[in-house]
Image (tube, rainbow, N blue to C red):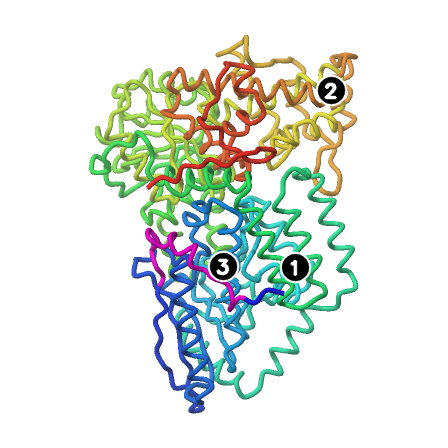
Amino acid sequence: MTNYEQIDFSPIQALTESEVITHSRVRDIRLPSGSALALITLDNGRDHTRPNTLGPATLAQLGETLDALKARAAAGEIQAVGITGKQYVLAAGADLSQLSMLDSRSTSLLVAQLGHKVLGRLSELGVPSFAFVNGLALGGGLEVALNSTYRTVDASAAAIALPEVFLGIIPGWGGAYLLPNLIGIENALEVVISNPLKQNRMLKPQQAYDYGIVDAIFPAANYLEDSLAWADGILADDACVQSRRRSLRGNNAGWTAAIEATREFLNARVGEATKSPYAALDLLDKAKSGTKAEGFAREDEALAELVTGDQFAASMYAFDLVQKRAKRPVGAPDKALAKKVTKVGIIGAGLMASQFALLFVRKLQVPVLITDLDQARVDKGVAHIHDEIGKLEAKGRLDGDSANRLRALVTGTTDKSLYADCDFVIEAVFEEVGVKQQVFGEIERIIAEDAILATNTSSLSVEEIGAKLAHPERLVGFHFFNPVAVMPLIEIVKTPQTSDAALSTAFVVAKSLGKNAVLTADAPGFVVNRLLAKVMGEAARAVYEGTPVAEVEKAFAPLGLPMGPFQLIDLVGWKVAAHVQDTMVRAFPDRFYANENFHALAELPEVVEKDRGGRVTGWTKAAEKVLKPAVGSTPASAATILQRVQDGLAHEIKIMLDEGVVPEVQDIDLCLILGAGWPFIDGGASPYLDREGASERVFGDTFHHPVIRGVGGHIAEVAMYA
């Protein structure tokens, strides 16, 4: 059992030189009953775009504050301690830039131990402690709350989560021990393991309350006042809180079964080479018995091991891409060149167009016009958008006035002359060059000369789409990913004619929509679809050679993508996949696999069979009839299939870089992380291909010098950008 008071933490003080310190500001509040509560507000002095983080200097200051409050409590000056954050955020967890600088296991262990020493004091003050979760609470930020005696949450808080497994580490400041003992093992497994592996899914405040992570939830309007009044009542009698906790936690009868079920899920989903989920699983399992001190000591050891390991290094490369490179897109012109968008036009009224309209009206708060071939289609599209706004209102994400205002901003018509005052017009019509040329030709005669045209094509040539325009310089590719509201990436495509004004407008609009934009040249499939077509083509090749579909899915598992190739095809639609494959085969017939039976399968409504977990296991009877005549008798081994797709991806990425499709390989990794769900703990596609030897096999070199290690790697080299 570790005695944190006897540890010398001076070796990690060198890390504090570049730390943005989150200060612990204290004020006394007199509660209605007359009791005194000392309220700590965590505040790094920056605006809400820079969340509070917890580095060594921050923890040291918080520790000193808690020591002083413990003395005041002993003297009878205060009857409770509260802790909250600056507006919109409690804390976003440990300062990852600091963690990435740790160069030894011993210093990593000290950071883990310092967190336990300081946050653990929240339960050792001699008076109750209350965490008022007023906003974002991630990782160590949520562990601040878990170490407190009681917790409330603001109903408008952005997100609550323990995302550490997503980054190749574990909740190391109490979360792995405290959470399962608070809310039960099944809910804890979902929060600590399942959610991070589902593209880092986070909890909304209501979910956190329903799970029992927090004891009360209050509206934003009077959140702190309501929380303080609630705390005053709890100081008098907490029986209701304790009763609720017991009912939500349940008993431990199913603990072992839940652990084993999750282990099976991990074996199927990520494989045993991925360390952090298994380390977290072991900690959660052992949390069933033993003392809190023993649980904290286990977390110390596990966190120290993982922070200095390969997978955290790869995660930090990926994290840096998403947090920094994505926010400063390479190649984006000066935003001062962007045209102000006061009205948006959407050509089409189908499902994709409706998704566009809902996103544009919610984020831009400007009039949105949709059109289609006949009024019935238009009316159906507008009705769908209004229904979706109604659902947001029913969930409490919009108030009545806001919902009505958004509905009023969305209009539909067959009269294209109403596009005249649109500043930004995007098409969502059939994926065929001639159709897109026709609709843009009609609209160009109506809109202003400086209005921007955008195409959402997934793989067609943007330059060819604009070839018949009088002003092709106004056209830009603006490729969303489905579902539009969820997927964070937009590929912005520049043709040789695209003006800086059009390009700048596209980047500004993308940012206003809450999306990350990456600039790509006008090349077939752009980035994500080009590389996914390589993946799907190699999967099809293996099947037509005679490999069972379930075996093909397993062979692709080491790539770490959220789903296997046929599950992905089934999700995006077989017709869409066939179209993308056609585009790539026409452009590069020597590099992309084609088979006419792929088109026959695309015509079938039910193509693959799945198990209860959603994994693809085989073909339906109708698909089997199509396949039987075409399938060979020389099945490929899993190793052969995997090497073919690895080498194919390495070859294609190298060609894309040589051709200037994107400025640097980091942009390809960023696209695949944001647009295809490539896992953080792999660091993206190019680091993975380097580590697996595909880069050396294909072109005798690596994409990165030195190699960024991750799953299965041996060294950790990550550059953190300023």
Mark 2 or 1, nearer chain start: 1
Q: Quadrant of the N terminus?
A: bottom right
Q: Which residue is label 2 attached to?
A: 637
Q: Nearer the viewer, residue 400 or 566?
A: 566
Q: Which residue is label 1 attached to?
A: 187
3 vs 1, front mark: 3
**Magenta region, residue range:** 4-22
Residue type highlighted by circle 1: Asn
Q: Which residue is label 3 attached to?
A: 140
* Helix, strand or loop under label 1: helix
Position of 111 relative to 676 (above/below)? below
2 vs 1, front mark: 2
The reply to whether residue 356 is visible in this rendering is yes
Position of 222 relative to 259 (above/below)? below
Main secondary structure type of the part rendered in magenta: helix
Within 10 Å of disc 3 (Cα), the crowding (few <14, some 14-19, many 20+) is many
Position of 28 relative to 655 (above/below)? below
**Residue at figure coordinates x 71%, y 49% from the top left:** 262
Q: How far apart, in angstroms, are the residues tagged by discs 2 and 1?
A: 39 Å
**Residue at figure coordinates x 53%, y 66% from the top left:** 4
Left-right relation of 119 to 537: left
> Which label was assigned to residue 1?
none
Q: Quadrant of residue 463?
A: top left
Q: Quadrant of residue 508?
A: top left
- As drawn, the residue found furthest toward the bottom would be 34
Q: Quadrant of residue 254?
A: bottom right
Where in the figure is residue 489, as x and y percent of width and height?
44, 37
Q: How far apart, in angstroms, are the residues tagged by discs 3 and 1?
A: 19 Å
Left-right relation of 614 to 215: right
2 vs 3, front mark: 3
Mark 2 or 3, nearer chain start: 3
Q: Quadrant of the C terminus?
A: top left
